[in-house]
Amino acid sequence: MNKIKGTELRQFMNKRFIEAVDLIFKGEKEAGTQLYTNDTTISNIIYTKNRGLVNAVRSGTKHVPISALDEFVKHFGMPMDLFFNKSVTWEYKGMVMGSGDSASKESDNIVSSGVQHTKSLKEGNTETNTILQKQLKEYQDIIAVKNVELEKLHQKTTALYEEINKLNQLLLEAKNETISAKDSENSILKKYLK
């Protein structure tokens, strides 16, 4: 078997997804039906949360979600292994219609194998999980360092606020003394002017 593991998997899934979308466009054009003419028409069917999903995957800004692949496989009757195995191929032969027919049952079996593959990824028996755990540890270390820096910054800020409050208090006392001196000077001047 030619299974893909690790970080390459998401990129491979994205690549295969776009290739499959392009095969659908080509097949529709050749058949003259053109039910699916652009990325948005596919996105609307497989992932209603984001009408721009296919375009985002095509441009590399998003990865195709497993739930979208699941709908894609069900709707277009393709093997889920297409997205996990380099040796699996697929040709678009038009729409898979109805429920209970052999194509639908085959699609259900394929979806089930994809779900099993997804579960195995979650179980921690794969290179992907190891890599993700390593990246998580790195991010946790970075966050810990940033938290220490943030605490130091907080302490400095608190000390600055205390200094500012002391200076404000001194300024207030100086202002009061100035007012008192001015009042005293005014009263002395009034005595001499009378």
Image (spheres, rainbow, N blue to C red):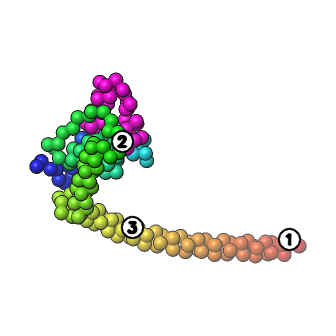
State which tag comes first along the sequence, 2 or 3.
2
Q: Residue at x 12, y 48 (%)?
A: 2
Q: Amino acid at mark 2?
A: Gly
**Which is the main secondary structure of the residues drawn in magenta?**
helix
**Could you tell me which secondary element the residue under label 3 belongs to?**
helix
Q: Are marks 2 and 1 in contact (CB under 8 Å)?
A: no
Q: Amino acid at mark 1?
A: Leu
Q: Residue at x 35, y 45 (%)?
A: 99
Q: Which residue is mark 1?
A: 193
In the drawing, what numbered circle is on residue 34? Answer: none
Spatial CA distance of label 2 from label 3 is 59 Å
**Could you tell me which secondary element the residue under label 2 belongs to?**
loop
Q: Which residue is mark 2?
A: 98
State whether residue 131 is above or below residue 56.
below
Which region of the structure is painted magenta?
17-46
Q: Residue at x 84, y 72 (%)?
A: 190
Residue 104 in the magenta stretch? The answer is no
In the drawing, what numbered circle is on residue 150? Answer: 3
